[in-house]
Amino acid sequence: MLGMAARRGALWGLASQAFQVAAQFVALWVLARHLGKGDFGRAGIVLAAAGVLAACADWGMGVVAVQRRAVNWRAATRLTMLGGLVTAGALAATAPLLAVPALLAASAAPALLLAGLGATPRARLTRALAFRTLASLDAAVCAVACAGRIVLATEGLGAWAIVLGDLCGALSSVALLWALAPREGGEGGGGLLADGARVVGTRLADAAFAQSDRLLVGGLLGPAALGLYGFGMQHAMLLPQRLAPLAEQVALPILSRLRDDPPTLARAYLSLTRVNALLVVPLAALLGAFAPQLLGLLYPERWQEAVPVLRALSLAAACAGLNSHPGLVWLAQGDTGLRLRWSLWNLLALVGVVAAGTRLGIVGVALALAARSLLATAAAQEITRRRAGVSHAAYLRALLPGAALGLLFAALGLVAPA
């Protein structure tokens, strides 16, 4: 039964993510013609600051309410509303400290409040394994956000187009979640505050890890350099960034139900490894190998500066795709401590390598990030392989199809005409 639910969820999720990747690519194609590097950079700083605070917006209830067997929904909703309110206020208060117009930064604050409001209905849908509903909802929200970005960009709003377009998506998300979520009863299960705090700690480290490179690049090299870096990152990470929420949405509730069945949990881990490798590694290899042709075909000449950045980040993208599920296995096994420690070490390593890479400019940052990603992925997979009781041979068999296809595409890029 769980296996069938997982397959259905994965299929619906993949269809939704494919649509979202296409929509985001179309929006990026339009924005690249109407926005400059500085616009991308200023919007990137705002979204990076909001992304760090978003880790607290639901007080961890998006994970805790899914992983638990019994949930006090009233208490969970109060915590998410408080988290959204506090984080929105924090962004508005710190807006003048960012290297962008304060009003632009503050305009992203309502999205944090909306993220908190939408957390418990999303958790209800996830607990009910309503993957079709969630996939359709996410696709609709992405379409609204991308349409908002495109319309506002063509009206000449610059960086505002990105920030306000995302706010349109957040509004539609909350409205749809509350309309579609089942009204699950139950007052059981205490300790939400403490469990949520541990999840928030992990998410804060993860969010800081995900956004600190942008904040460092923007602060040390300026908005134009950040715009170039963000442009390359949006292409390289387009698929990996969509896989991470899909893995949490579909895999976490399934893995959590397998915590007392180690052999089945091990097989699920290998299946996730095989699928992620097949989806991400070949695409990353294509992006790196054919970066000059891709950017030359799709964008104005000024974006050719992003070619070396995109090539370096393609390796980081392959690693990010493979790293979207080990932490979920740890959470399913109940080891939130390991997940938190890993996030903190990741954050410290990222800050160090990015700060060092800025001495060589934006390409140096991309190369440093790629090297760190490769080492971190190898370590995370080795830890998870041992905890799941999977042999080296079984793990390599799961990895082989995606890795072989990626090497083939990389080789084709070497012989392709410039």
Image (cartoon, rainbow, N blue to C red):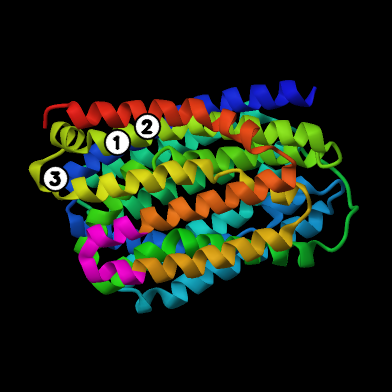
Q: Given contact means CB atoms under 8 Å apart, are the residues at marks 2 and 1 in contact?
A: yes
| Mark 3 or mark 2, whichever is nearer to me | 2
> Label for residue 317?
none
> Which numbered disc flags the more N-terminal residue, 3 or 2?
2
The mark tally for this picture is 3
Amino acid type for the residue under numbered disc 3:
Gln
Residue 57 in percent (x, y) is at 59, 61
Amino acid type for the residue under numbered disc 2:
Leu
Residue 175 in percent (x, y) is at 57, 42
Q: Residue at x 13, y 45 (%)?
A: 304
Q: Residues within 10 Å of mark 1 (few under 14, many from 20)?
A: many
| Residue located farthest toward the front when viewing the structure as drawn | 393
Q: Give the main secondary structure, helix, strand or loop, of the magenta stretch.
A: helix
Residue with the mark numbered 3 = 304
Residue 322 in percent (x, y) is at 52, 41
Q: Residues within 10 Å of mark 2 (few under 14, many from 20)?
A: many
> Residues under labels 2 and 1: Cα distance?
6 Å
Q: Which residues lie in the magenta part?
A: 355-368
Residue with the mark numbered 2 = 283
The secondary structure type at the circle numbered 3 is helix
Residue with the mark numbered 1 = 287
Amino acid type for the residue under numbered disc 1:
Leu
The image quarter in which residue 286 lies: top left
Q: Residue at x 82, y 49 (%)?
A: 68
The secondary structure type at the circle numbered 1 is helix
Q: Residue at x 72, y 51 (%)?
A: 331
